Image (spheres, helix red, strand yellow):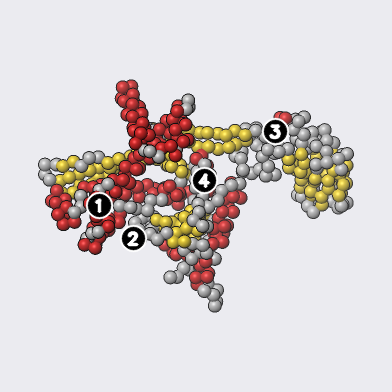
Amino acid sequence: MQLFERKIQEDRSKAVQRVLDENRSWKKYKSLLEALEGADSARSAVAANSLLVMENQARFMESVSRDKRMEAVFTNALGTLVPKIIDIVRVFYPNLISHKLVDIQPMDRQNGQIVLVRPVYSNSAGGVTAGQQVFQNITDGTYASENITAVVSTGNGTATTLTGTLDVVPVRSGTVTITCGSVTCTDNGSGTLTGTGVTGTIDYTSGAISLTYTTAPANGTNAVAQYRYDSEQNSAHTRSLDIQITNLPITAEPHPLKVVWSQMSQFAAEGHYNLDLGDMLTQLVGSFIKQERDMQLINQIILHAQADVSLNFDATPPTNYSKLARYAEMGVKLDYAESLIQSELGRGGVSWVLCGYNAANIWSQVKGFKESGVVAPIGPYEIGTLRDGTVSVIKVPTMDANTYIVGFKGYVIGDSSIVLGDYIPLYATPVFQSPDLYNAAGMVSLYASVVNQAKYFRKGTVSNFTA
């Protein structure tokens, strides 16, 4: 086993060196070179595997361009081909969309790892709780400051005097503001709180507060203090961040497919259409495998997307109102979905919209939509973009016709909605020619995916669409 593993490492090293030697543009990938030569073995392995993945993808894409006969099919002979052959040729360049939807990370072995990154607070201090993710549920919207927001006391509808004690002390004088309903008071820097309809005192050292109101605060109304504590005297309440980098073990699952054809059909294809049937069919199988990966990711998104009734859109136009003008109003749903993501997670945007047929027809009428110009599509494909090309609108034939999902891909590796671990993007066997004059070739892709942040998905519906 050790000899086998050593052989794999030696082959990988040779392959990486070959990529660097043969690819004259490798200097563009300076960060990969630095990682390869660095002392961090984990980063070096990831960088090496990234180069191998790049080489495998390049080989697949170049396999057609190197074949002059295939070039002839695309440039000169389309007019003479029967319709079924034209359909097969179109499949060679499917509109794969995985890279638009999720983060793709290379794996260096089948039982490998993907990397997740999450910034969290590592201590309970300054109004935050240990383990809480940065950006989420922050009381005052600050991270590296002395600002504190805290409830002093709660009114019961009869008491005019409220008392309480601030937990994070000492308090910097002149920084306190207390709001109770519509009544607000501030400190004068000497321990006195004043405002219209309220007076009080504050002890900057102990945090003790006493408030006297002209009218008793309503039952359940909180007196909320906003202030700054003195971090020079109390460093224990300085917020601390931990950038958690998690290596999540995953196993890349094999996705194999085989193609078989007779030698007689190959003779016919070569004689009548100047086609290498073996090359054509193996490339066809490769495209099927990659399209299957797109659909598996889309099905994961559909399963985890959170429905929100506020995103539902009634396409019925008002009286004396243009139908297309009504459809164009769908654009406000994009902004609202983005707001839903940001309000819950404290971050996020919009990267794409997955649509069923009817939903796609409505999204294509939104202001700023630009068609992608895809002809004769197969499977899920990008029909166009919004927001100056930053948001992909993707039609999914298998999706419910009246459903759409708005999603955000993520900021960085660990913040991605879904992480796809890619071990072998695509591998093809040599063609096997059997004595019974049948040929066969196999292809396989090995990958696995993990849902990392499902709250980046928001689902809505359309109704009453008419063409």
Occupied quadrant, residue 172: top right
Which disc is residue 227 wearing?
Answer: none
Q: Residue at the spot x=47%, y=55% of the render?
A: 392
Whether residue 300 is visible to the viewer of this picture, yes or no, is: no
> Which numbered disc, 4 or 2, marks the residue that appears first in the sequence?
2
Residue behind mark 2: 376
The residue indicated by pointer 3 is: 238
Residue depicted at 24% across the width and 50% down the height: 68
Q: CA distance from mark 3 to mark 4?
A: 29 Å
- What's the distance in space between the residues labelled 2 and 1, CA to CA? 19 Å
Q: Amino acid at mark 1?
A: Met
Give the residue number, with chain letter if any, for mark 1.
70
The three-letter code of the residue at mark 2 reads Ala
Identified at 27% across, 57% down, the residue is: 75
Q: CA distance from mark 4 to mark 2?
A: 31 Å
Q: Nearer the viewer, mark 2 or mark 1?
A: 1
* Residue assigned mark 4: 410
With 111 as the anchor, is 159 left or right in this view?
right
The mark lying in front, picked from 1 and 4, is 1
> What distance separates the C-alpha of mark 3 from that of mark 1?
65 Å
Please identify the residue farthest to the top as the structure is shown: 2
- Distance, label 3 to label 2, CA atoms, is 59 Å
